[in-house]
Image (cartoon, rainbow, N blue to C red):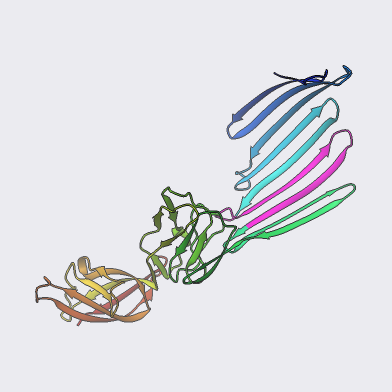
Amino acid sequence: MISEDYWQNERNSLSANLGYYKNFNAIGISLNYSWNRNTGLYGHAEQDNVVSFEINVPLDKFLNRTYASYGTTHASGNGTSHNLRLNGSAFDDASLDWGINATLAGRSEQQVVGGNVSWKASHGTLNGSYSRSRDSQQLGYGIAGGVVIHENGITLSQSLGETIGLVKAPGAEGIGVNNYAGISTDSRGYAVVPYLTPYRRNDISLNSKTLRDDTDITYMTNKVVPTRGAIVRAEYKTAIGHRVLMTLTRPGGKPVPFGAMASLLKSEENASIVGDGGEVLLSGLPQKGTLQVKWGNGQGQETTCLADYIAHKSAGASGLWNATSVCQ
């Protein structure tokens, strides 16, 4: 209970509030009561009692990430009002938020219906809303975003915070950023993470489920510790091309030795170690090309051979190609 008295006059205010909330298997129920009494300058008192009830129900069994709520309020001075809302989000990264509502207001019996939608994309956020009552209707819309200019060009983004991150994954287009709705890399492999916490470790994690079949990234998470107001870069090593499971043999039919190092000719970035039976998995390869394979003790006894290959897409494993080649 709260009591307020006003100095040098007879005005005073007295109020009390009581609330209850309970969650039953993800269904939330709340009940509130408030009482107010205001005394004016000449001792005239006005009293108001307000009782409200609200229930929130998840509808995941029917619509993923969707909630329905109903609320009613009775005020002694304004009658009873009712409000019904339906809210949810769409897409795998919850980048689209939407809501519809209907209200019947008190003694005026004014009816209001409306809806809103917000879509977050890498290049900005779009918002729209509409409401209609007996006497009027309103339409609202807006767009918000940001621009980051860096040494490698210009990258559009959602609205920027004080401390931001710049993802650099060369050539990796359309890779989502975990925990940031709607954000993914552009055609050059850049994306802006608009909000980071300064002076703390921030994990910027790419979504492996959004990798294309021709894209491979060595480490999907980058740890950064930015200062306040900084733009910090998070770089990722990418391999753009096919993932090829190669079987390498020598001219006599024996497999290339276990532990040999295989890489695309004139490129050490795609290197991988040959396993049992001459098998090696390489990422970022063109459909056809030449591999360079080396093995030995590195003391003048190193053996090198070249293997021309043509890869064929595997019917069993998604995104995996196969090839067989003789290294000579």
Quarter of the figure with residue 279: bottom left
Q: What's the residue at 47%, 71% (across, down)? A: 151
Q: Position of residue 131 (x, y in %)?
A: 80, 50
Secondary structure character of the magenta stretch overall = strand
Q: Is residue 85 magenta?
A: no
- Looking at the rendered image, the quarter that the N terminus falls into is top right
Looking at the picture, tell me which residue is in the foreground, 38 or 87.
38
- Does residue 326 lie above or below 218 as drawn? below
Q: What's the residue at 18%, 73% (across, down)? A: 256
- Looking at the rendered image, the quarter that the C terminus falls into is bottom left
Looking at the picture, tell me which residue is in the foreground, 325 or 243.
243
Q: Is residue 99 magenta?
A: yes
- Does residue 315 lie above or below 50 as drawn? below
Q: Position of residue 249 (x, y in %)?
A: 21, 76
- Does residue 283 lie above or below 140 as drawn? below
Residue 62 located left or right of residue 215 = right
Q: Position of residue 192 (x, y in %)?
A: 51, 61
How many marks overall? 0
Q: Position of residue 247 (x, y in %)?
A: 26, 73
Q: Which residues are magenta?
A: 91-119
Looking at the picture, tell me which residue is in the foreground, 4 or 222.
4
Quarter of the figure with residue 118: bottom right
Residue 94 located left or right of residue 86 = left
Q: What's the residue at 68%, 41% (across, down)? A: 68
Q: What's the residue at 69%, 54% (across, down)? A: 117
